[in-house]
Every structure is written in C-alpha cells, then in structure tokens.
Amino acid sequence: MASIKTIAIIHNPVSDHSAADERDVLDQVEEIVDSLGILGYAHEVLPFTPNLLEMKRVLRRINPCCIFNLVEAVDGDSQLQHLATAFYDHLQIPYTGATTESLFITTNKVLAKKWMSLGQVPTAEWLAMENPSMSAPPFPGRYIIKPVSEEASVGLDASAIVAVETREELRNLILERQRLLGKRCFAERYIEGREFNLSLLGRPGGVDTMPPAEMNFDYPEGVPKIMDYKAKWVEGTLEYEGTQRTFDLPPSDNDLLAKLQDIARQCWNLFHLRGYARVDFRVDAHGQPYVLEINANPCITSGSGFPVACEKSGLGYDDMVRRILEDTLGRESLV
C-alpha cells in the first residue's frame, strides 16, 4: 500500500497584532488544509522564519513531496519573500507558484514595469527616484503614488492620487509619501477608466485564462475609483461596500476581453510564471489597456478574486488546489 504523501504548507508568521491583509493567510491555510485532506494528502503547517537552520531541520523531518508556498513576507518585509523560495530551491524541494526569479521581479513594481516595457506589454508611464521610466511621463498630469514592494493595496488611499505640473513637484510628493509610509515609493500615471482582473491557472505545458472580472466602483462623486486598502480589507467603509466584482460583461466587450486575455498570457510567458497568477488592468476611455500589476501567487481565500474566477470556469476550490499541485508536481506524481 502506497504511503500518503505529505505537503508542507508554509506561510509568513502572523500575530494577534497583525493587520487584516496579513491575517488573511491563516484563512488560506485553513482552506488548503481541508482541500488536501479531500485530495488524499497529509499536511504539516509551519511559519517561515529567518532561522534557516531550524527551518531546514523541520523540513528534513517532514520530508514533504512539495511545499504549498504562502509566504508573503520574510521578517515582515514583503520585498524579501523571494528568499523563502530561494531556500526551497537550495533544499531542492518543489513548491507551488512562482519561482524565485519571478517573485523577485514581480514584487518590485518598478522593476516589473521596466520588464513589461522591455517586453512590449502596455503599462502606464512612471517616475521612480532610482529607476526612471523607459518613456518620459507627461506633465502636467495626474499620478498615483504607490509603495514599490507592498501588496494587497497596502499604502494606497485617496491621498495617493495627485495632480502635478512638473517633474520636480512629483519627485517632492514621492519623497513626502515615502516619509509618511516609511517605504520606498514611485509614481505611476493615473489611468482614469475601467478596472479588470485576469486570473491565470497553469497546467502542464501551458496556462488557462479564467473568465475576466471587472471591478465596479459605486462611489460618490469626487472619490477616486481605485482598489485601495479600505476597498479590500476594511468592512463597513464606503470603499469596501461600494466595490463590486462582476463577471457579467456585455457582448460589446468581447474584443476588449480577448485583448486582455492575450496580454495576460503574454505576461505569464514574459515573467515565466507558474501555478497561478492574476494580472490587473486599467482600460482608458479609448479602449487602451494598461497592466497595473502582476500578482504572482495571489490570495486564494474563498471569495477572493482568483478562486471566484476559477469557480466561474467550473473549477471548485478543491479542483483549483489540485490544478496548482499538478502544475508543481506533474499529473503522474499525483496518482
């Protein structure tokens, strides 16, 4: 009788004082544990710590067939999350989702935008203190100032959108926001228009695009229509209650949606993504799409964008987890 394979679920540590976006990983862990049981796997759950000798000792004891990687930060810093997968690479243990190289690039928004520009993926012009745009950003103009390496809309609110006359004025506002947030920031030309999410699910030899979703913002006049921190995480706020995801898009959008799917697949190949990912878009009044972000290893809590898109394609949560594992180990090893 074949022994039951064990999967190690590794996540970033969470405390009672952690913010909502950080605590969400525990919900992901709980749901993945349930799915692994249904799929016939044993599991071990452990937080990732910088004590690599202890991590190595524990993983050698567990001897997992693979790691379900949910690490979103190392030592509290999201820009270091690729160090976790570099450690798995060192131990030669397969893991779900993006590779070390892909995480390194996609978790640095400025580096990712430069990569997109080189790969001819449409993305809005930007200004960063140490890594300028490939094309000159226009002035005067409206910009949104974002942290370089944060995820989950951390550091985003209405005050992040600014109207400026000159490059120097924008540089000063970037420095001001860096001091406010305590994080490196950059400015991206603000695209007024519609917002879409395209989820991508890997399979051996390729990738499937899930049904596109549009984010609708039912906000009062004057409130910027953006997916800021409140819209994602703070229940009861105007932003949270006024943001709705829809997959019911009119036939007149078919050509646009096909274009978004093509660009999303282009991003999958350009960034050498694996497992699962989400590409976020803005589309301007002329129908021109711009990639906002590449989300490698997006949130997979039930009700979040990725699992809901999978459900719309006919894949339940357990099937989604199976597909992610299949992309990691190959179909034959899952029998």
Image: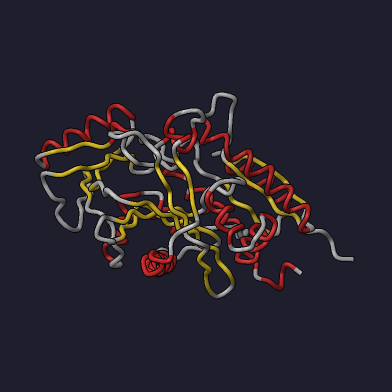
Residue plotted at (30% across, 27% down): 180
- 50 sits left or right of 148 in the view: right
Residue lying farthest to the bottom in this orientation: 205
Residue lying farthest to the top in this orientation: 17
Q: How far from the left and from the top, in percent, is residue 138?
A: 13, 50
Q: How far from the left and from the top, in percent, is residue 320?
A: 64, 59
Residue lying farthest to the right in this orientation: 1
Figure coloring: secondary structure
- 7 sits left or right of 203 in the view: right
Residue plotted at (30% across, 67% down): 119
Asked if 230 appears above or below 55 in the picture, the reply is above
The quadrant of the image that shows the C terminus is: bottom right
Q: Could you say which is closer to the camera, residue 213 or residue 319?
A: 213
The quadrant of the image that shows the N terminus is: bottom right
Q: How far from the left and from the top, in percent, is residue 269?
A: 42, 69
Residue 51 visible in this rendered orientation of the protein: no
Residue plotted at (33% across, 43% down): 148
Residue 38 visible in this rendered orientation of the protein: yes
Residue plotted at (47% across, 38% down): 232
The quadrant holding residue 284 is bottom left
- 43 sits left or right of 123 in the view: right
Q: How far from the left and from the top, in percent, is residue 37?
A: 78, 52
